[in-house]
Structure formats: C-alpha cells, structure tokens
Image: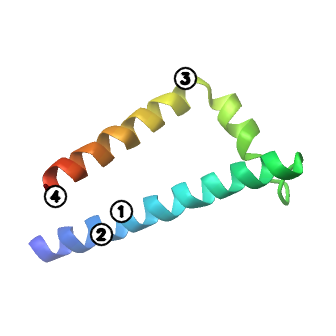
C-alpha cells in the first residue's frame, strides 16, 4: 500500500511539474508574440483568476519549500 501512495505521489509531482513548465512556456511565448497561442490565452487566464491564482502560487511555493526542507 505504501508503494501505491509513493508511486501516486511521484506521478502527481511529475504532472504538476510538467503543467507549471507548460504554463511558463505559454506565458513567455505569448509575451513575445503578443497574441493568443492556438486559442490559449495564459496571460489573460492569469489576470482573470486574480486572487485565486495568487493563492495557487503561494501553495506551490510552500510545497516546494516543504520538499526542499524534507530533502535536507
């Protein structure tokens, strides 16, 4: 049972990492070309989310700090 949770944790960590990388890439590309990317508007979505997106960023930062502290 512990292996299942360990594998699930690794899978979720990888998925979140890939998602954050795609979001960063989308924001950078949209800032460079100054238009939507195949109908995707990452900068507009972040602006529309407002305070809720700031909460997500805070959660990610705290999670990353927790992982670093645990690894030390």
Marks 1 and 2: in contact by CB < 8 Å?
Answer: yes
> From mark 3 to mark 4, how far is it between C-alphas?
31 Å
Residue in the image at 23% along x and 52% along y: 67
Residue 2: x percent and y percent?
Answer: 10, 71
Query: Which residue corresponds to mark 3?
Result: 51
Quarter of the image that includes the N terminus: bottom left
Marks 2 and 4: in contact by CB < 8 Å?
Answer: no
Query: Which residue corresponds to mark 4?
Result: 71
Query: Which residue corresponds to mark 2?
Result: 10
Chain-order first, disc 3 or disc 4: 3
Find residue 42 and name its label: none
Residue in the image at 13% along x and 55% along y: 72
Query: Which residue corresponds to mark 1?
Result: 13
Asked if residue 1 shows in the view, the reply is: no
Nearer the camera: disc 4 or disc 2: 4
Chain-order first, disc 3 or disc 1: 1
> From mark 3 to mark 1, how far is it between C-alphas?
24 Å
């Amino acid at each position: 049972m512990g292996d299942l949770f360990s594998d699930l944790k690794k899978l979720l960590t990888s998925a979140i990492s890939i998602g954050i990388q795609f979001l960063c890439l989308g924001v950078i590309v949209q800032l460079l070309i100054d238009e939507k990317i195949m109908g995707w508007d990452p900068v507009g979505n972040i602006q529309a989310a407002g305070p809720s997106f700031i909460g997500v960023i805070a959660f990610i930062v705290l999670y990353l700090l927790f992982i670093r502290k645990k690894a030390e």
